[in-house]
């Protein structure tokens, strides 16, 4: 693992990849730019990017206009005395996340209508900025609480963090620098207020850390990195006040970041903070902090992560649970925590080049991020449980409760997920490949074109529905270089074929091809996407005696929609003696339906083990988890109890 | 089942039992008075009643003084402008619950020091009452929000409910009527405000309903029953405003009480409301409402209740979960929900005479109510999970977070449980027996004396540690009458021996002895308290492949304290081929210790079933659940995974 090299060691031509969310100022690897990854519109991800561009961005804009979250900026600009402000104290951040999504989308598509909308929104935001750079519509203006009067819950620095990320996106997507100027003034004000000469404090919701580092990189402003470092180091020393019903752990204020061993408390906060800490470690070459982040990631993945890649076991506090506390039904797995996990894993990949981080990104992309939005891009899951016991109620076209699982809703009272999905899908190209001095690595497979490190590659594939990935070299460097292909951790029995030669078996990990590539070279990867059983660690009590079915990178699920009439999902018992077989992008499994007791009024505990009388084998169809509830409210489960387990 | 008989049908001498929390104005059954049940100080419950009297009452009083919850009344009395009121908006109710506990304790023990403290506290409360009867320290006075300005969350009617229950306790315990006068004025004000000529509204937290009915009974005030009926009927029609992050179900405002089929939402709210609805049904002879309550109780017990009798599966919203959602680790099982469940079951027993309600009371008493307080009566569990994964942190002598399970704490930010335990233990005698026209029923077994229905019985027993219960008739009516003994639902193989004759086998349910009893008669009940395995219904996913061990009415648990050094509780696998054997009031079981993987950093899911290599049999000691964490923080589980279940 290479943590850091001086800037001089970095391959000079790597700096060319400029339209990316994360560009460390040193180190051997650079992610591909968003403008250098073009996805085919019919592919799994290309389709979603286009729906995001055509529907989701507009959807979010309209909702925020409708709810007055945009007018909040106008009212501050007008100097109104505000006593009836709509929206939570962090609603500004949704506007900024939308701006970030729009900026990445502009880099990708340069749509003039979108540019107009973006510019108009930036104008409204900028008009609300105070002369000294302070920018917030929930604090610090007539009728509102004063600036920084509620650091634990006020989200003021969190908001600026998202503003900075939007500005970084604008900077790296081209266009004028109006948003960059706004964001820099806001960040400068923070530096005055909270910098080395300012007050020693942190924001209850991390985000400013990761944003400041990237802003420092993008704008060449070392002070921002310095301030990010201060925020990271201050955390865990009890600077935040005690909040009724919330623990210091909720805010990651229980333990200094460099002493912590696992992620804990509010999942999104923990993931954003840790991504920022990793950035600080990389930029300052801080090995102790870096190792602390790796240790936390490892323990979190090994003991506190769902098979979907989802993180967060508790609705209470939207937080991580204890080790092995991974209930399927009450899994929270907030969509935004999936986004945060990808942010952290991506930074870890860039710093180390280790394949395991790209593996987790794939798992989380296909099973959390892809699960949230509906096909039309106008409704979203906030929580992503692995077991739905009761059909969700139909969502209504109002502000829905985020904790109501089972149905995608157009908007939520806390509506962080739609804009987080939007910015992730708009910038998704950036996670597909990376370049280093030896060549390039293809990290995620999607139909389309990749241009980086002197390569131009065209990928043709129906992945993940099919496992064949055909990569055509359209151009390549005129020297020997390494084309590195990720063989996913689940892909036992994969092969790689180069230019029509005999397919070579490859192990999960990296498959490296070293040669002087030329236009016309073709590499064909075969990944085994036959459905397979997946078994939980015996310490995960919540799914004891159960197994899941995966197919390639997709976690599958059984929906009540696919059950015979009158059969409840809790009566299904999986027969693992019969292997699952492929069916479209899902699978068909053999199961039994057990007879359940009828109406009863006694306690559900007895002095003898319950008899489970089976129906004889029947076959049931499973669909990808990311599509569940698309055919209407349903009951659903990912882990199916095994036949013969009472 | 007899729902209701006219007052004329009721046995006239039953009215004598006056010191009881629930006295329906008609119906064939009356509970024993608190003054008519004398518990031996060394018995299971007698010991707890004495600790409650000697330690808990004073403990609660001191905490509320320390935190300023008592001074809140003084400040209102002084007419202060209050902008810094300590405590939640329902802190007044804790004072009232303490008054109720003190009143019942005064009925039991007539301690002069306690009487002085009680009178002083009543005085302070009374001084804060407005001229029109309104009494609240969080609303309606200078500096505070105005009266009834936050019906959803303000708890104003909830507070009056607990005031009324305290006043009922005073009325039925003797003493002057100062508190009764205060409470009646407060209730009269509510009648003006919310009665037939008032506003159509309900309180977010039910409690006023059950309190108004009892106050109506105690004070002979029909208007209170009328108002209770209005509150019950108004609920479920969306009268409460929408509250961010909370659903109408949380407040039981989603469905009218008479249409609902199961308890849902916030558990304590649901249980208090349903107890009040049952009271209204009984007093108004409303069969439809009565049947609705029975239906809800049955479905809740069958699908939403833990083996401990605990109710409430979700920390989020402190609520019931969906059917079969009964996680062991995240069981909330709030102590107050246990109290509420006993309140409901007791009313159902009085109305129907069915044994199942007394069975649930026993289960809940021994495994929820007895679990909450520490041996010294100065710290409490708020939540009562059935599986503790990580040792709880030591409680500190400040205001603890209620959601931190694993350790009893002296006080909580929301501190409803200590005073609820206190009033329940002080009035516990009232649940031991009941009388009807045919004789008496002994419902719960505790060493001590019972005097009712012309009987005086002396019970000698070391129950639940031992299963022998010896009842000596000290006096009896001079006519044939029925002595009805509850044989608990778990007691397969019980016997009853009368006057030294051959023990007769009896089935769970009622064992009736009909004769003309005479002083010196002795009945010996033998309940089988050998430990036994208990199996969950196969729809409870969270404990699939696991069994619990019970012993008599006690649920047992395994604590890490009793494990060999170095063995984690998650490595224990129960061997159900070897029967558990008695050990003091716990049990010894045979188990295996399985080898768990070492340090790992991969996802805890694999493509092959995990091997579980056992240690060979070892023996482990289990203790009663109600004693867990008494020897310091520990990990714990009630349901143990079975050997051979991966």
Image (cartoon, coloured by chain):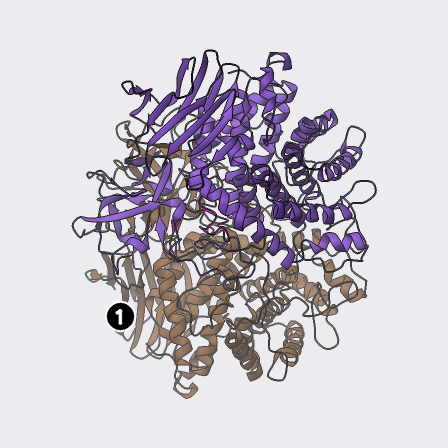
Chain colours: A brown, B purple
- Res A224 quadrant in image: bottom right
Q: Position of residue B372 (x, y in %)?
A: 47, 47
Q: Position of residue A437 (x, y in %)?
A: 35, 80
Q: Of A57 and B105, which appears nearest the observer?
A: B105
Q: Position of residue B603 (x, y in %)?
A: 33, 58
Q: Of B518 and B451, which appears nearest the observer?
A: B518
Please state if B251 lies on the left or on the right of B461 as rendered.
right
Q: Position of residue A90 (x, y in %)?
A: 63, 61
Q: Which residue lies most toward the bottom here? A: A8
Q: Is residue A542 above or below residue A219?
A: above
Which residue is tagged 1?
A513
Overall secondary structure of the magenta section = loop
Residue B488 at least partly seen: no
Specify the subunit that label 1 lies on.
A
Please state if A294 lies on the left or on the right of B76 as rendered.
left
How many other residues sit within 10 Å of disc 1, few (<14), some (14-19) or many (≥20)?
some
- Residue B376 on the magenta span: yes
Q: Is residue B370 above or below residue A131?
A: above
Q: Residue at x 63, y 29 (%)?
A: B256
Q: Which residues are magenta?
A: B370-389
Q: Residue at x 64, y 81 (%)?
A: A198
Please state if A533 lies on the left or on the right of A216 as rendered.
left
Q: Residue at x 40, y 25 (%)?
A: B472
């Amino acid at each position: 693992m290479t943590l850091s090299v001086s800037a001089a060691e970095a391959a000079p031509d790597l700096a060319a990849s400029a339209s990316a969310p994360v560009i460390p100022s040193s180190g051997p690897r650079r992610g591909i730019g968003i403008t250098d990854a073009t996805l085919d519109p019919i592919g799994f991800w290309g389709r979603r990017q286009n729906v995001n561009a055509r529907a989701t961005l507009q959807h979010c804009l309209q909702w925020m206009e409708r709810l007055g979250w945009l007018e909040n900026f106008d009212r501050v600009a007008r100097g109104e005395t505000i006593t009836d402000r709509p929206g939570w104290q962090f609603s500004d951040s949704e506007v900024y996340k939308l701006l970030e999504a729009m900026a990445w989308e502009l880099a990708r598509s340069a749509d003039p209508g979108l540019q107009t909308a973006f510019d108009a929104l930036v104008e409204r935001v900028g008009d609300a900025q105070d002369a000294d750079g302070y920018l917030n519509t929930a604090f610090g203006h007539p009728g509102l609480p004063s600036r920084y009067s509620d650091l634990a819950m006020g989200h003021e620095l969190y908001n600026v963090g998202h503003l900075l990320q939007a500005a970084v996106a604008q900077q790296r997507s081209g266009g004028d620098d109006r948003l960059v100027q706004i964001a820099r003034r806001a960040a400068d004000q923070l530096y005055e207020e909270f910098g080395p000469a300012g007050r020693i404090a942190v924001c209850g919701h991390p985000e400013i850390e990761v944003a400041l580092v990237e802003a420092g990189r993008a704008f060449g402003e070392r002070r921002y990195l310095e301030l990010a470092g201060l925020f990271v180091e201050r955390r865990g020393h009890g600077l935040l006040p005690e909040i009724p019903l919330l623990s210091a752990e909720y805010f990651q204020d229980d333990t200094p970041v460099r002493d912590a061993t696992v992620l804990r408390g509010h999942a999104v906060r923990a993931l954003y903070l840790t991504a920022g800490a990793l950035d600080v470690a990389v930029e300052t070459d801080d090995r102790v902090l870096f190792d602390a982040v790796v240790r936390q990631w490892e323990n979190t993945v090994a003991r506190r992560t769902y098979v979907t890649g989802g993180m967060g076991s508790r609705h209470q506090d939207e937080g991580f649970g204890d080790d092995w506390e991974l209930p399927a039904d009450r899994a929270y797995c907030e969509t935004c925590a999936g986004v945060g996990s990808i942010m952290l894993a991506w930074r870890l990949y860039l710093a180390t080049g280790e394949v395991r981080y790209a593996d987790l990104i794939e798992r989380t992309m296909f099973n959390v991020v892809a699960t949230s939005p509906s096909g039309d891009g106008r409704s979203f899951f906030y929580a992503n449980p692995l077991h739905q016991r009761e059909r969700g109620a139909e969502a209504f076209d109002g502000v829905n409760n985020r904790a109501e699982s089972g149905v995608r809703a157009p908007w939520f009272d806390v509506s962080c997920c739609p804009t987080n999905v939007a910015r992730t899908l708009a910038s998704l190209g950036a996670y597909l490949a990376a370049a280093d001095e030896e060549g390039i690595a293809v990290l995620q497979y999607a139909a389309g074109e990749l241009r980086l490190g002197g390569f131009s590659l065209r990928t043709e594939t129906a992945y993940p529905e099919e496992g064949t990935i055909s990569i055509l070299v359209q151009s390549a460097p005129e020297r020997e270089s390494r084309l590195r292909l990720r063989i996913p951790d689940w892909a036992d029995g994969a092969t790689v074929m180069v230019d029509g030669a005999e397919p070579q078996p490859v192990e999960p990990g990296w498959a490296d091809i070293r040669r002087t590539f030329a236009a016309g070279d073709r590499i064909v990867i075969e990944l085994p996407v036959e459905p397979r059983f997946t078994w939980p660690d015996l310490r995960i009590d919540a799914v004891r005696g159960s197994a899941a079915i995966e197919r390639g990178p997709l976690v599958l699920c059984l929906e009540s929609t696919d059950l015979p009439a009158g059969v409840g999902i809790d009566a299904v018992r999986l027969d693992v003696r019969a292997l699952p077989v492929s069916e479209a992008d899902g699978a068909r499994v053999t199961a039994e339906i057990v007879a359940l007791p009828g109406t009863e009024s006694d306690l559900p505990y007895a002095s003898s083990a319950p008899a489970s009388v089976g129906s004889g084998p029947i076959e049931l169809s499973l669909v990808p988890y990311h599509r569940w509830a698309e055919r209407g409210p349903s009951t659903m489960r990912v882990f199916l109890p095994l036949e013969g387990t009472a």
